[in-house]
Amino acid sequence: MSEEPVLPRIRPEIAALPAYRQGKQASPDAFKLSSNENPFGPLPGVVEAVQAATSINRYPDATAARLRARLGARYGVSPDEVHIGAGSVSLLAQLLSAAAGPGDEVVYAWRSFEAYPSLVAVTGATSVQVPLTADARHDLPAMAAAVTDRTRVIVVCSPNNPTGPTVGFDEFAAFVEAVPSDVLVLLDEAYAEFVTDPDAVEGHRVRALLERPNIVVLRTFSKAYGLAGLRVGYAIGHTRVLDAARSTAIPLAVTAAAEEAALASLDAESELLHRVAVLAERRDRLAAGLRASGWDVPQAQGNFVWLPAGERALEIAAVFEEAGLIVRPFAGDGVRISVGEEESIDRVIEVAASVVPR
């Protein structure tokens, strides 16, 4: 007779899911380029704002009302058209849970953000993955063609993580017009602040232009604003759609410190723009150097670049690690390299040149 304890029954599709795997941590003498973090510290005023949030014995404002009001004014919408969550990924989970369930389908490009398959599986819905184009972009016509009467949500990631290209403004507008109005379209813009392509989609502008209540835009303070450790993001959308997300949210998930840090970050707009410009210049220089060494790097518009390493992804990532560069491999597909400290740029190019496909 087995002495193993009887465990609670877990949904088989959940038991089969791999746990989310974040970018590998780095030793003090290595560059961590695996998690798309901002190499700069908090913006001016942020640390002081967090330190002033001393009432940690009290619950935070569950609605993050001040931050919603500030963002509403920024984007020309009402506070009720803004929803705050513990990072944009938590908002994505809420919206998926609100709109999709067993028997439904969720369409997204692949490869894209690695959390998408797991988040969809948790809802009980089925993932419909549409392959990227040869140049690592979303194939929006194919995604529109993949919509069926079971489709409840479509996720569009621009710039696409981990490959880098954006979706164009005009092509996104045409795509939304081709999608049934009762299908929720989530535009994941976690890296939008780094975009320098003038033709790229801007979620708040396209929402205002099309006046389609099925569009929700997701953004975060984790990347450009450098608040990855505090977990705060926001969604912009129709009030009733966001109310559904609010209903699925874990209460009080956004801390008072996170709200104060986000508000202080918005006060430091000029420094933010300077830092983003620095990182965008490093990104473009890094991408150019990699291309010059022989790598076919796709359009890079986030704070990272993509090496289409294919089956050599794990092998090549190990070479980078030996050189003190912690990068993010995606087995069978490629290697994502975050834009980090200035001192890392030439070293990345040098190592990449040593493993370029011949």
Image: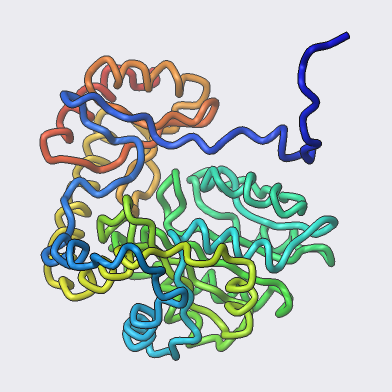
Task: List x then y, in percent, for residue 203.
Answer: 45, 74
> Looking at the rendering, which quadrant does residue 150 occupy?
bottom right
When asked about the image quadrant of residue 162, the answer is: top left
| Residue in view at x 50 percent, y 58 percent | 157
Q: Residue at x 51, y 47 (%)?
A: 113
Question: As displayed, is residue 6 above or below residue 141?
Answer: above
Name the quadrant containing residue 177.
Answer: bottom right
Question: Residue 164: x percent and y percent?
Answer: 40, 49
Give the side of residue 120 with respect to residue 26, left or right. Answer: right
Q: Judge left or right: residue 249 versus residue 315.
A: right
Protein image colouring? rainbow
Task: Please name the residue shown 13% across and 64% down the image.
Answer: 48
Q: Position of residue 183 (x, y in %)?
A: 71, 72
Number of dots carrying numbers: 0
Q: Return the residue found at the far top.
A: 1
Q: Is residue 57 left or right of residue 63?
A: left
Q: Between residues 72 and 196, which one lies in front from this camera angle?
A: 72
Q: Nearer the viewer, residue 350 or 318?
A: 318
Quarter of the figure that contains the C terminus: top left
Q: Quadrant of the N terminus?
A: top right
Residue 197 seen in the figure = no
Q: 156 and 42: which one is in front?
A: 42
257 or 217: nearer the eye? 257
Eyeballing the image, is 210 above or below 217?
below
Residue lying at the far front of the rendered structure: 57
Residue at point 28% right, 63% down? 196
